[in-house]
Image (cartoon, rainbow, N blue to C red):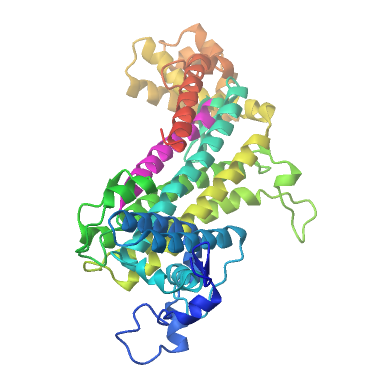
Amino acid sequence: MSSGARNGVATPERRARGAARPTKVWAGRLSAPTSEQLERYTSSLAVDRRLGADDVAGSRAHARMLRSIGVLTAAQHRAIDAGLRAIAAELSSGVFTVSPGDEDIHTAVERRLFELAGPVAGMLHTGRSRNDQVATDLRMWARRACTDLLVALAGLQEALMTRAGEHRTDPMPGYTHLQRAQVVSLGHHLLAYVEMFGRDGLRLGAARLACDELPLGSGALAGSTLPLDRERVAHELGFGRIAANSMDAVADRDFAVELTAACALTMVHCSRLGEELVLWSSAEFGFASLPDSLATGSSLMPQKKNADVAELARGRSGRVIGDVVALLSVLKGLPLTYNRDLQEDKEPLFDAVDTTAATMRMLTEVMSAVRFDVAAMRRAAADPALQATDIAEHLVANGVPFREAHTIVGAVVARTLAEGRTLADLSVEEWRAASDRFRPGVVRLFDPDAALRRRDVPGGPGPRSVTRQLARARTIVARTRRAAAGG
């Protein structure tokens, strides 16, 4: 090795002797320098800088492949790989710097490689375009993001399952139209969210599978005349398959849509959980309270304690839904193959992933710490009106068609409301005056615990049914954790 190079990385003297890379990777075609305003407008560095580690990893695998097919000599490969390893270290330590002329993280890495390795850096781009390079980097990042999201999701599912187990038999009102409807248990209610988030886990797993395809080697759109070993690169980067069509490979962002859409639906479920927490922590419900460390106050009203974190979970769902719309709008009118519009794919994808991961982790902390007022829930569940359906079914069990039973009980409800009484205030005689099919046991239908036991059907809120659902919840959490581990 000459005195002008050490460890395969070019010294300043060697770089001075070598030809410099053009200011722009495409500068050979255009004679005039780009305007500063155009450079500011077209730069994506502020967004795509987070792809730096993936860009370097992809470039190192590409360089090893070029060496294996004889495009690079051993010495050239050593110099390029040493430069890329140095860039990886700079990115990891946060000392990597960008230059005003860098269009994106990919050109920034290439510019830095020229500084470190000299003219041999120009060999690295053999057999690839920024089109397939960007698509590869983004797929690598998205695949890893799916794993991170699954880990966060499993944590939230586990917190909900744990609290459900604590409150397996605690009665509360279930609601339709935000009106008290029938008795359920708090455990049953919380397990409904485990089911929702379980479906989100399946969608995130499917999104990760959609990411698992290598575009590199597709070039700008038509591949390469060189004998590129794409299978080798796919294996080194952990991709399960290579893209089958070079045009589709560089234009495809379906994987980004699928991941963003999975995030959006996860955020809708987070929003619904947030809404429950907002309602339950209000004085009107009084079912729950957040610890002071997870609540906020009012700048004006000293008495206020607000569930702002739940409100933000609810509000930020709208932003992630907007990310899906933004990404679909970018794609909807694009002819094949690459168009600069695709530069706008990253911001909605990154925002959706970041927001969803942060929201799930925040809600996990909230669900682990929230205090449920089971006494207040029980009082609400003791409202005799919640047993109106049970009373109608009591008549059905004694031979009355359900529609007729519904009418009979509805008339009794209207009468008691007019008289300022409840259904539990009626005597057996009064019930039998409404229908001779009522039996004496009708007056014992108003205990909320008994109401839960009557609903020990598969999927219902009864204690034994909820015990079975808890076992299912453990299976769902384990499935999410396996998916996060790549299983």
Quarter placement of the C terminus: top left
Task: Report the residue that reaches farthest toward the front.
Answer: 2
Q: Nearer the viewer, residue 305 or 236?
A: 236
* Residue drawn at the location 34% of the way across and 79% of the way down: 26
Magenta span of residues: 188-214
Residue 447 as seen in the image, left or right of residue 398: right
Residue 241 as seen in the image, left or right of residue 310: left
Task: Report the residue that reaches farthest toward the right.
Answer: 302
Residue 380 as seen in the image, left or right of residue 148: right
Measuring from the top left, give residue 410's x and y in whole percent. Answer: 44, 27
Measuring from the top left, give residue 406's x and y in whole percent. Answer: 39, 24
Q: Nearer the viewer, residue 378 or 343?
A: 343
Task: Report the residue that reaches farthest toward the top.
Answer: 440
Q: Nearer the viewer, residue 360 or 250?
A: 250
Measuring from the top left, give residue 253's x and y in whole percent. Answer: 32, 58
* Residue drawn at the location 35% of the way across and 49% of the way down: 211
Residue 44 as seen in the image, left or right of residue 379: left
Task: Please say whether residue 145 is one of the residues in the magenta stretch.
Answer: no
* Residue drawn at the location 53% of the way across and 71% of the way down: 3
Can residue 185 be spotted in the picture? no
The image shows residue 468, relative to residue 16, as above or below, that is above
| Main SS category, magenta section | helix
Q: How many marks?
A: 0
Task: Please say whether residue 194 is one of the residues in the magenta stretch.
Answer: yes
Can residue 64 be spotted in the picture? yes
Measuring from the top left, give residue 409's x and y in whole percent. Answer: 44, 23
The image shows residue 336, relative to residue 61, as above or below, that is below
Q: Nearer the viewer, residue 447 or 171?
A: 171
